[in-house]
C-alpha cells in the first residue's frame, strides 16, 4: 500500500473552503442533501456500468444510502454502495481539479456578502464541500467497484490541505464521515435527520436508511433498518394520485429552481410509443441562468434505470427551460451512449414530448393567463427561437406568442389570433414594427397612416431575437406579416397620390433629391397624418434594427 501523502487544495477551493468554514451559517442543513445526492449519483453510475459489466456488482446490489449518527464519537456517516472512487479519482474530484462552477459560486457568495445563498452550492458542482459547514474534519473512506479490496482514505480539516492513504475496504462504495462541529451536534439527532431527508431527499430513488435499535423489556436489543424516504418514482404514478406539493417538491429536487413551477406536464403514453414523462415549465427565469445557460434535455430513464442526465436528444434545444424526466419502455437497457445521440425511437420521443410541452404551454395560457404572461416575459424569447428552428411546430409556436400593439394598453398583450380577429374588413395583412422600446416605437411616424385607418400595429421590442425569428414567419394563417418601416408597405389604401398631385410636386421632389444624395428616392405619399416626412427602407434592405446593430458592432 502507498504511504500517506499530503496535498494542497486547488487555489479556488481554498478560498471556497475558507468562506464555507468562516462565513456560512444559514441553511447549513443542506449539506445532507448534497451528500445524499452524491451517494445517489454514485449508485446510479454503478447501476449503469453494471448493465455491461455485471461482475462489477460483486453480488452487492441492494442499493442503499445509510445514515449512521454516532453520539459518542460525535460523527455522522453517510455511506453508500455506489461506484466508489480510486485514489486518483479522490485526489482529482475532492481537491485538485478545477470545477468550472467554483469561481462562479465564489463570486455569487461574495456578491451576496458571504452568508447569502449557500443552498445553491450544489448547482455549482461543489456540493461536497458543504460538509465543512457542519464538520471541522471530514474523512472519506472509499473503494471503487471491481475485485480488489484496495481502497483509499481521504481526510481534511478544510484548512487548505488534505491527506490520502491507501487502506483495505471490504465493501464497494463510499463512507463520508463528518466529525461534527460543537455547534452542529443537532445532526446526530435521529428525528432531525428523518425530517431533513423527508424535506430535501424524499424522491431520491434509492433507499435512504438508518439503523434503529429497540430494547425489549427483557433487555435484549434488536436492530432494524428504518427507511427514511418514500422513494416513489413519482413519474410512474397515476396523475390523480400525486398532489401538487409532491410535484413541487420533486421539481425543486431535480431543478436549479427555488420556486414552484408554473405548470406540470405528466404524460403516460401507450401504444406505438410507450413511455412516462414528467416535465415542468418554470414560473420565471430561474436564478441559475445568470451564470449558466440551462442544459437542454431531460433525465432519461429506461425501465427505471437512469441512463443519461441530461439526454439532449429527447427535447429540442429551444425548449431548454423544461426540466424533467422521461422513462422509456421502448429503448433497450444496454443502449450505448452513441445510440443515445440519435436514433428513430429518440426522434419519435422528441416529437411526442415536444407536442406535450407545447400543449402544456397552451393550457397554461388558456387557464392561468397571468402565470403565462410572467413566464413569457422571462422566457418567451426561447419560443421565438423555436419558430426559426422547428418548422413542424411553427404554427403552434406562433400561437403562443404575445405582443404589445398600438392598441393594447401598456402591460397587456395580444396573440396573433386576437390581432387577426380584430382586423377591420379592409385590412388584409399583419403589420409590425421592431424597436428598442414601446415608448420609442409609439412616437414613430411610420405608424401614423395605420392609426388613421384604424389598423393595429404590433410593437416588438426585443430586436435581436425579433429580427431573427420574423424572417422565418412570412405569414400567419394566410395573412402576410409586414414591417411598417419598409417602402412597399403603406396603409395608403384609396388615398393614393394622383397624377395631378405628382406633377404639381415634381419640382419640389427633385430639389429634395438633389439636396439628399444619400436617399435613393424621394416619393410623395399620403401615409402620414401628422409628420411632414419619414424615411423608409428599401423593401429588400436589411431591417433598420439589424443595420443599427451592425453599426454598433463596427461592421
Ligand atoms: P457534483 O456532485 O456536482 O459533481 P460534488 O462537489 O458534490 O459535485 O462532488 C464532486 C465529485 O466527487 C463528484 O462528481 C464525484 O465524482 C465525487 N464524489 C462525491 N461523493 C461521492 C460518492 N459518495 N461516491 C462516489 N463519488 C463521489
Ligand atoms: Mg454533488
Image (cartoon, rainbow, N blue to C red):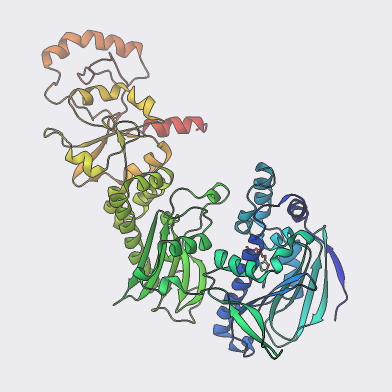
Side (left or right) of 473 relative to 453: right
Side (left or right) of 89 relative to 392: right
x, y percentage for residue 361? 33, 54
Residue furthest toward the front?
217
In the rendered image, which quarter is residue 169 located in?
bottom right
x, y percentage for residue 326? 43, 70
Which is nearer the eye, 20 or 430?
A: 20
* Residue drawn where x is 66% and y is 88% of the image: 216
Side (left or right) of 521 relative to 28: left
Which is nearer the eye, 215 or 78?
A: 215
The quarter of the rendering in which ligand 1 is drawn is: bottom right
From what the image shows, is residue 215 above or below residue 466? below
In the rendered image, which quarter is residue 10 located in?
bottom right
Side (left or right) of 63 relative to 469: right
Which is nearer the eye, 84 or 233?
A: 233
Is residue 81 at all visible to an observer of this figure? no
In the picture, the quarter occupied by the N terminus is bottom right
Which is nearer the eye, 408 or 555?
A: 408
From what the image shows, is residue 487 above or below residue 125? above
Is residue 472 at all visible to an observer of this figure? yes
Q: How many marks?
A: 0
x, y percentage for residue 550? 47, 33
From what the image shows, is residue 3 above or below residue 137? below
In the rendered image, which quarter is residue 402 located in?
top left
* Residue drawn where x is 50% and y is 50% of the image: 286
* Residue drawn where x is 20% and y is 10% of the image: 505
Amino acid at each position: 500500500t502507498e504511504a500517506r501523502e499530503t496535498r494542497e487544495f486547488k487555489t479556488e477551493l481554498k478560498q471556497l473552503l475558507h468562506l464555507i468554514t468562516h462565513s456560512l451559517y444559514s441553511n447549513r442543513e443542506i449539506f445532507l442533501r448534497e451528500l445524499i445526492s452524491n451517494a445517489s449519483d454514485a449508485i446510479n453510475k454503478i447501476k449503469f456500468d453494471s448493465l455491461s459489466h455485471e461482475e462489477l456488482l460483486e453480488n452487492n446490489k441492494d442499493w442503499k444510502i445509510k445514515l449512521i449518527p454516532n453520539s459518542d464519537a460525535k460523527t455522522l456517516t453517510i455511506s453508500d454502495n455506489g461506484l466508489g472512487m480510486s485514489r486518483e479519482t479522490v485526489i482529482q474530484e475532492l481537491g485538485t481539479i478545477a470545477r468550472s462552477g467554483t469561481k462562479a459560486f465564489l463570486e455569487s457568495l461574495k456578491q451576496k456578502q458571504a452568508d447569502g445563498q449557500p443552498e445553491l452550492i450544489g448547482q455549482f458542482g461543489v456540493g461536497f464541500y458543504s460538509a465543512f459547514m457542519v464538520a471541522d474534519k471530514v474523512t472519506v473512506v472509499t473503494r471503487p467497484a471491481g475485485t480488489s479490496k484496495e481502497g483509499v482514505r481521504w481526510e481534511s480539516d478544510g484548512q487548505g490541505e488534505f491527506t490520502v492513504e491507501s487502506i483495505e475496504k471490504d465493501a464497494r462504495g463510499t463512507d463520508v464521515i463528518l466529525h461534527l462541529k460543537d455547534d452542529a451536534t443537532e445532526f446526530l439527532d435521529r428525528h432531525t435527520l428523518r425530517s431533513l431527508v423527508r424535506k430535501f431527499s424524499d424522491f431520491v430513488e434509492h433507499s435512504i436508511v438508518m439503523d434503529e435499535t429497540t430494547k425489549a423489556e427483557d433487555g435484549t436489543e434488536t436492530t432494524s433498518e428504518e427507511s427514511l424516504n418514500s422513494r416513489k418514482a413519482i413519474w410512474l404514478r397515476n396523475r390523480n394520485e400525486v398532489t401538487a406539493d409532491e410535484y413541487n417538491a420533486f421539481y425543486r429536487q431535480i431543478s436549479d429552481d427555488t420556486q414552484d413551477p408554473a405548470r406540470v406536464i405528466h404524460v403516460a403514453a401507450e401504444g406505438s410509443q410507450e413511455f412516462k414523462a414528467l416535465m415542468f415549465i418554470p414560473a420565471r427565469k430561474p436564478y441559475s441562468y445568470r451564470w449558466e445557460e440551462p442544459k437542454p434535455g431531460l433525465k432519461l430513464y429506461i425501465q427505471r434505470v437512469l441512463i443519461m442526465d441530461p439526454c439532449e436528444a429527447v427535447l429540442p434545444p429551444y425548449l431548454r427551460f423544461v426540466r424533467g424526466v422521461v422513462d422509456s419502455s421502448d429503448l433497450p437497457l444496454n443502449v450505448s451512449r452513441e445510440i443515445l445521440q440519435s436514433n428513430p425511437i429518440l426522434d419519435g420521443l422528441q416529437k411526442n414530448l415536444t407536442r406535450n410541452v407545447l400543449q402544456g404551454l397552451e393550457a397554461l395560457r388558456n387557464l392561468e393567463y397571468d402565470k403565462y404572461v410572467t413566464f413569457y416575459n422571462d422566457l418567451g424569447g426561447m419560443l421565438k427561437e423555436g419558430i426559426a428552428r422547428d418548422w413542424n411546430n411553427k404554427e403552434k409556436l406562433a400561437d403562443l406568442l404575445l405582443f404589445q400593439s398600438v392598441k393594447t394598453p401598456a402591460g397587456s398583450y395580444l396573440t396573433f389570433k386576437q390581432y387577426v380577429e380584430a382586423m377591420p374588413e379592409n385590412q388584409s395583412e399583419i403589420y409590425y414594427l421592431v424597436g428598442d422600446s414601446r415608448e420609442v416605437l409609439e412616437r414613430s411616424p411610420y405608424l401614423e397612416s395605420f392609426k388613421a385607418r384604424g389598423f393595429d400595429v404590433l410593437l416588438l421590442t426585443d430586436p435581436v431575437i425579433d429580427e431573427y425569428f420574423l424572417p422565418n414567419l412570412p405569414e400567419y394563417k394566410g395573412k402576410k406579416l409586414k414591417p411598417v418601416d419598409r417602402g412597399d408597405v403603406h396603409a395608403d389604401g384609396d388615398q393614393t397620390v394622383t397624377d395631378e398631385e405628382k406633377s404639381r410636386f415634381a419640382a419640389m421632389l427633385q430639389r429634395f433629391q438633389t439636396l439628399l444624395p444619400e436617399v435613393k428616392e424621394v416619393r410623395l405619399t399620403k401615409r402620414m397624418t401628422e409628420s411632414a416626412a419619414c424615411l423608409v427602407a428599401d423593401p429588400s434592405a436589411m431591417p433598420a434594427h439589424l443595420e443599427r446593430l451592425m453599426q454598433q458592432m463596427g461592421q
